[in-house]
Amino acid sequence: MVSFVYPEELYLFVESIRCFQVRDVGSSKWLEVHEMIIKLSQQAALEVSEHREEEVKEFLISRDKLSVLIHEAYCVNLWKSRVLPHLLEIDPNPQATFLIYTVLYHEAAVVALLDLCLYHPSGCESLQDSVLDLIDYCAQGVAQVIGLVSMGYHENETKVDVDEAVLTELERQKRDLIYKIGLRCVSLLNYLADNVSLFHLGAARRLLVTHDIPWLMVDVLCFRPWQRNTNKGMEKFIDEKWTSVEDAAKIIKPEAQAWFCVRQLLLNPQIMENYTLNEARCKQLSKLLGLLHETLLDQLPVLIELKQFVSRLTLSGNTANKKQSLILEDLPQIQKELIKEVEREGGFYQIAQSQDGIFLNNNREEICALATKLTNAYGTEVLCELEQHLADLELQKPEAKPEDSNVANGEDVKLHKCGSCQKAAKKKCANCKQVHYCSRECQLKDWPTHKDTCKAI
């Protein structure tokens, strides 16, 4: 069975996850934990996709590591927004940017792990006070996606308001990850809204009053960041990549989660007591009526109640005369404590100067050694093996015999050549379906050459 983390490694990997400060980002200790988080993220996704027992999720929850993951997401977010600009001021064109991208990708891997864990109520319950920090983080992430979409970021290059030609490759990678993280945040907010009864009152207030998540989700549903029109037709963001679709009306996961999030909040009478439906909010929520069409309701029947609620709200109008109850509100601590520690270190610019030798290193040998180490961490060989495993499963499916199909039609059986050794090959790359291989060894051997073409396809 293909695995990124074996059972005997799992406990060590989970126990090794710990909180770092902004000054530690990129250090050797940080990179060691980064490798473990990447492999845990890959393993958790594999367990879900193959319907295995979710051991990674269970270990993370039982060892109380979800709050640590939230801390790590904030740590990298602060580094990305406050330290990285100073580093690029020191050297606007660093010789090697893969370590910077590694840090940016770390945040995406952490959020992916949280997404898998918080699908389960037990994961939400284990958050405790860190749920406030997570709500703040997700609200910011969703707002950033809306900002990118409003600039036309997800449309064709010819339509964008920002001149993409002047953006560096690093900036493009950074924006791509912000986009993916933001859509994950929609998912996380849905899980938090669905399990809001498990949290203290401060969490519900932060969702409804501090960040006004219903308003935010209406904006998301109006901007529709999960779809775009291209020269090739309609594309939707499925499994974190843009995919051409024939049925534009079919609902995909991020869109459904945005709808569910709005529904869970607006139809919860306990928490709606603290949500004042003033004129501005009524006007914003009324936009949902135009989106709740029959095709949508056929696919998501649970939204019929939401449509009825919004229809009544539109007719009744302003109901802002509710009495506001006094609530002693807890405040999020993770970002606050991280910034305090940075100030003790002399500020973000001081940290950027101390990390100059790590991220702006021009030593070719050290760069190559680090690149090799990180390549091994991402488990490309295991990914190849997984692809081959999926291809083998395809081959095991019953197929029509050649004599019944090709020969019967007067055609010769077509033989494919191995992309590595040129021998006869039956198996093909599970991702691009274009290149054939005679064995897993040949596929692994050809992967460094084939991977760029494969990803492009």
Image: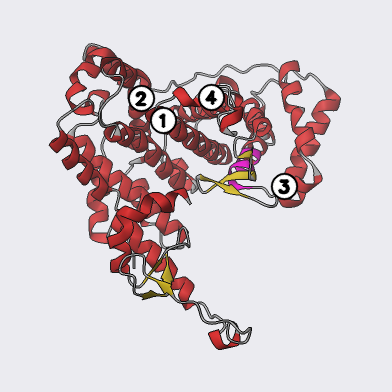
Asked if one can make out residue 127 in the rendered structure from this viewpoint, the answer is: yes
Q: Residue at x 31, y 60 (%)?
A: 446
Report the amino acid beneath label 3: Ala
Q: Which residue is mark 1?
A: 174
Q: Label 3 vs label 4: CA separation?
A: 33 Å
User: Mark 1 or mark 4: which comes first in sequence?
Assistant: 1
Badge 3 crowding class, 10 Å Cα cut-off, few under 14, some 14 to 19, many 20 or more, is few
Q: Which numbered marker is on residue 249?
A: 3
Q: Nearer the viewer, residue 345 or 196?
A: 345
> In screen coordinates, is 235 left or right of 188?
right
Dot 1: element: helix
Determine the CA span between mark 1 and mark 3: 30 Å
Residue drawn where x is 34% and y is 31% of the image: 71
Look at the numbered disc 3 and give the secondary structure of its residue.
loop
Q: For marks 1 and 2, give the one nearer the viewer.
A: 1
Disc 1 vs disc 2: Cβ atoms closer than 8 Å? yes
Residue with the mark numbered 4:
206
**Mark closer to the chain start, 4 or 2:** 2
The residue shown at (30%, 62%) is 444
Q: How is the image coloured?
A: secondary structure
As measured in the structure, the alpha-carbon distance from the residue carrying label 1 to the one carrying label 4 is 28 Å
Part of the protein shown in magenta: 252-259
Are there few (<14), some (14-19), or many (20+) residues within 10 Å of tag 2?
some
User: To which residue does mark 2 refer?
Assistant: 80
Mark 3 in CB contact with mark 4 (< 8 angstroms)? no
Q: Amino acid at mark 4?
A: Arg
SS class, disc 4: helix
- Expressed as whole percent of the image width and height from the top left, the position of residue 168 reads 40, 26
